[in-house]
Amino acid sequence: NAGVTQTPKFQVLKTGQSMTLQCAQDMNHEYMSWYRQDPGMGLRLIHYSVGAGITDQGEVPNGYNVSRSTTEDFPLRLLSAAPSQTSVYFCASSRLTADNGYTFGSGTRLTVV
Amino acid sequence: AQSVTQPDIHITVSEGASLELRCNYSYGATPYLFWYVQSPGQGLQLLLKYFSGDTLVQGIKGFEAEFKRSQSSFNLRKPSVHWSDAAEYFCAGSGGTSYGKLTFGQGTILTVHP
């Protein structure tokens, strides 16, 4: 099925550990982004990319790294996990013109202990 | 700065009553505007979107929204709410220097009483 696929769905990390959240889309969308969702704060943009090899910071980029080596994949790396990074993470993609809206993945629930 | 604001954190309505969820935006030019719905533990589903043209936009599940430039608003409405509409609703916008960056409001939780 076409769409945005996120893995894993759930993850528990210890403080200081690193990990990568995976995001893949098969719609040939140029634009991909990562959001974190925390209660009462909506979704906040972490990093985004407008195409392979191009990434930029969003509203809350500290503690996260991204790369975009292909159009399809946009992994999010937590360098040294902290309890403040406990959240639900969503990946989204769209055409660059955004005229078809944004497609979201089903989310990754991350707990850092 | 570009922003989207949802003034109501939590709204409670009775089943069958009408619904209006408020959304205000702040953009230099006319933004793209969206409404998403999220059920507990689920992802986000697009209800409707506004890009240009007709200011009254129809969406899925019987929802509609009206773009009002003079009030910088994009309120979501439904004439008769069903218990299955209970969820969290997010208004979002993109525009200005980058139509790719989507900015979300804080969300409105809708509770429906039988």
Image (cartoon, coloured by chain):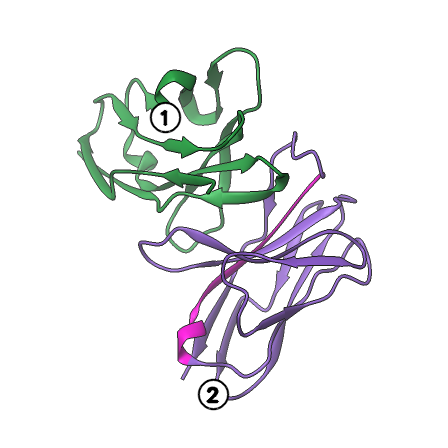
Chain colours: A purple, B green
- Horizontal side of B10 relative to A27 (left or right) equals left
- Horizontal side of A55 relative to B44 (left or right) equals right
Q: Is residue A80 above or below residue B17?
A: below
Name the residue that disc number 1 marks. Answer: B76
Mark 1 nearby-residue class (10 Å; few <14, some 14–19, many ≥20): many
Q: Are marks 1 and 2 on the same chain?
A: no
Residue B74 position, x and y percent, is: 40, 25
Q: Residue at x 73, y 66 (%)?
A: A67
- Horizontal side of A1 relative to A61 (left or right) equals right
Q: Is residue A19 magenta?
A: no
The secondary structure type at the circle numbered 2 is loop
Q: Residue at x 35, y 44 (%)?
A: B107
Q: Chain of mark 2?
A: A
Residue A113 position, x and y percent, is: 40, 84
Q: Residue at x 62, y 38 (%)?
A: B97
- Camera-side residue: A24 or A64? A64
Residue B56 position, x and y percent, is: 45, 14
What range is drawn magenta here? Answer: A83-95
Q: Is residue A94 magenta?
A: yes
- Camera-side residue: B9 or A57? A57
- Camera-side residue: B114 or A36? A36
* Residue A14 marker: 2
Mark 2 nearby-residue class (10 Å; few <14, some 14–19, many ≥20): few
Residue B75 position, x and y percent, is: 36, 25
Q: Amino acid at mark 2?
A: Lys
Q: In which quarter of the view is residue B87 placed?
A: top left
Q: Amino acid at mark 1?
A: Leu
